[in-house]
Amino acid sequence: MDEADAAATDELVVGRRVRIFPGTSDERRGTIVEDFGSDPAHGVDIGSQHIVDASRRWAIHLDDGDLAFIDSSDLVAE
């Protein structure tokens, strides 16, 4: 992780207001409700069967009531 990534992640904590997918047509606002940690996540494949994608770091309770699971690169603190 470079210094810019580390600084951005330091701003992201549970309870912090954020924007997801900033600057895109999918941008939405919400509050971080869970940090699942920075351990690398891996998808699961058994043979040719894809079971699940890699997990995301953050759970965001969006202002419209939805819950989103997002990586740090898709968030900015408000």
Image (cartoon, helix red, strand yellow):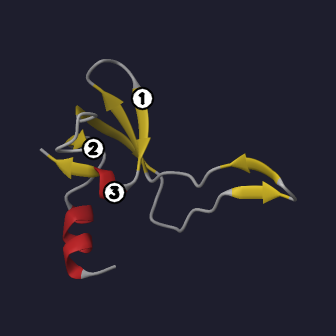
Label 3 close to label 2 by CB (< 8 Å)? no
Disc 3 or disc 2, which is closer to the eye? 2
Residue 73 percent across, percent down from the top left: 32, 58
Secondary structure under tag 2 reads: loop
Three-letter amino acid code at disc 3?
Ser
Side of 14 where 47 appears, left or right: right
Earlier in the chain: of badge 3 and badge 1, it is 1
Side of 44 where 59 appears, left or right: left
Label 1 close to label 2 by CB (< 8 Å)? no
Secondary structure under tag 1 reads: strand
Earlier in the chain: of badge 1 and badge 2, it is 2
Q: Is residue 68 above or below residue 56?
A: above
Q: Name the quadrant of the C terminus.
A: top left
Question: Quadrant of the rendered structure where residue 19 is?
Answer: top left
Three-letter amino acid code at disc 2?
Phe
Side of 39 where 58 appears, left or right: left
Q: Which residue is mark 2?
A: 21
Q: CA distance from mark 1 to mark 2?
A: 14 Å
Residue at position x 84%, y 55% from top? Answer: 48
Earlier in the chain: of badge 3 and badge 2, it is 2
Residue 23 percent across, percent down from the top left: 16, 44
Q: CA distance from mark 3 to mark 1?
A: 16 Å
Dot 1: within a 10 Å radius of its alpha carbon, few (fewer than 14), some, or many (20 or more) residues? some
Q: Name the quadrant of the N terminus.
A: bottom left
Residue at position x 77%, y 57% from top? Answer: 45
Three-letter amino acid code at disc 1?
Leu
Q: Which residue is mark 1?
A: 67
